[in-house]
Amino acid sequence: MLRVPEEDKDRLAAIAAAEGLSLRAYLARLAETLLTPAERAERAEKAKAALAAWNGYAPTVAQEQDLDSELDRRLAQVTGR
């Protein structure tokens, strides 16, 4: 059982209905498509290894942090946060 505010449940149910799904089916599909933090980290490591093997791209930790900060800045501009 999952308890959420009624307005959130209604919103999710409306989204599910618009896609021709029950709320239960929609939430199951959503859960199947989302990654855990560990899964995201694993995929990131695989992507970095593939880039290094393909073209030698191997950023330092400081470069990764700079790129993460730049991405956060750009996302904040787009989302208004």
Image: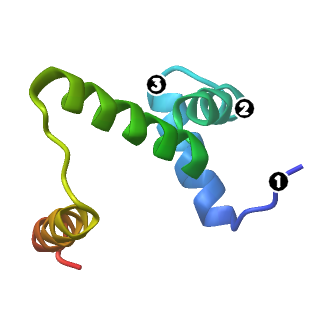
Residue occupying image coordinates x 22% and y 70%: 62
For the residues labelled 2 and 1, the Cα–Cα distance comes to: 11 Å
Q: How is the image coloured?
A: rainbow
Question: x%, y% of residue 24?
Answer: 72, 32
Which tag, 2 or 1, sits closer to the chain's start? 1
Q: Is residue 79 above or below residue 10?
A: below
Residue occupying image coordinates x 56% and y 47%: 12
Mark 2 neighbour density, 10 Å: few (under 14) some (14–19) many (20 or more) = few
Q: Is residue 12 above or below residue 8?
A: above
Per the image, label 3 sits on a secondary structure element best described as loop
Question: x%, y% of residue 15?
Answer: 48, 39
**Rendering quarter of residue 66:** bottom left
Question: x%, y% of residue 71?
Answer: 17, 63
Which tag, 3 or 1, sits closer to the chain's start? 1
Q: Which mark is residue 14?
A: none
Q: Which mark is residue 24?
A: 2
Residue occupying image coordinates x 56% and y 51%: 37
Q: Three-letter amino acid code at disc 2?
A: Arg
Per the image, label 2 sits on a secondary structure element best described as helix
Is 25 in front, or is 14? 25
Asked if residue 40 lies left or right of residue 28, the reply is: left
Residue 36 seen by the camera? no
Residue occupying image coordinates x 29% and y 37%: 48
Q: Which mark is residue 2?
A: 1
Mark 1 neighbour density, 10 Å: few (under 14) some (14–19) many (20 or more) = few
Asked if residue 42 lies left or right of residue 23, the reply is: left
Q: Is residue 17 above or below residue 80?
A: above
Asked if residue 42 lies left or right of residue 78, the reply is: right
Q: Three-letter amino acid code at disc 1?
A: Leu
Which tag, 2 or 3, sits closer to the chain's start? 3
Residue 32 seen by the camera? yes
